[in-house]
Image (tube, helix red, strand yellow):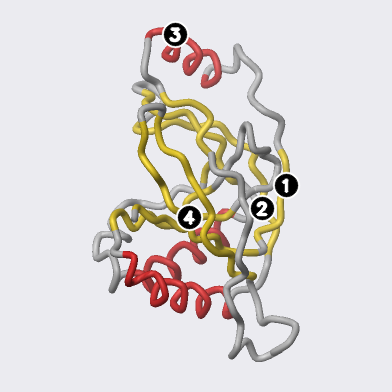
Amino acid sequence: MRLFVAVDPGAGDPAAPEHLTLAFLGEVPEGRRAEIEAALRAVAARAAPFAATLDRIGAFPSAERPRVVYRGVGAGAAALEALAASVRTALEPFAPSVGRDRFVPHVTLLRVRSAADQRTARALLEGRRPAPPARSFLVGELRLKASELGRDGARHRTLAAFPLGPTPSDPAGRASFARPVRDATY
């Protein structure tokens, strides 16, 4: 299974879902899933929910040569960076390369694959085309997601969610469990 860990900013819908990837594990044997969930459960139990804001436009690898245009996180970026660092450290035994890439908290707006995409990217980055409005969201859980590659690109499916902070039934957070999630495949 190709796995990654994300938070969902909550404004997407099944036709246009969004996620903010904290860690990409890549191919992981199904038999390791329970261990990965236990590691994520422990990270989530130690983290408190917090607010974040999507309010910036940026590009990878640079604005001069955009391959991806994104909506970046302003307020809450430091908390997301800390959460991503904790997730990546916890998942290193399952995917040693999980923490190698620099973490930039963002939601992808556009992948540049054609000349038309290049024009759209330039217009967004130069402010000639309006970006999606800034919005705040609550980071309240981690989601373990599977990514399935197909002809039309990757489809993502949430396997489990891990609420941040101790669970209501156990204020110390010792017995929190993954919450099964019904999530649209996209």
Which callout, 1 or 3, points to the residue nearer the camera?
A: 3
Q: Residue type at mark 1: give it.
A: Ser
Report how far apart the C-alphas of labels 1 and 3 lie in the structure.
30 Å
Report how far apart the C-alphas of labels 3 and 4 lie in the structure.
31 Å
Q: Residue type at mark 2: give it.
A: Ala
Choose the circle earlier in sequence order: 4 or 2. 2
Instruction: Name the residue: 34% across, 65% down.
Output: 30
Q: Is residue 20 left or right of residue 135?
A: left
- How dense is the environment of label 3, judged by Cα within 10 Å: few (below 14), some, or many (20 and up)? few
Report how far apart the C-alphas of labels 1 and 2 lie in the structure.
6 Å
Report how far apart the C-alphas of labels 1 and 4 lie in the structure.
23 Å
Q: Quadrant of residue 182?
A: bottom right
Q: Residue type at mark 3: give it.
A: Ala
Report how far apart the C-alphas of labels 3 and 2 lie in the structure.
32 Å
Q: Residue type at mark 4: give it.
A: Lys
Choose the circle earlier in sequence order: 1 or 3. 3
Residue 118 is marked as none
Instruction: Name the residue: 46% across, 58% down.
Output: 5
Residue 52 is marked as 2
Residue 145 is marked as 4
Identify residue for label 3: 116
Is the Cβ of the residue at disc 4 closer than 8 Å to that at disc 2? no
- How dense is the environment of label 2, judged by Cα within 10 Å: few (below 14), some, or many (20 and up)? many
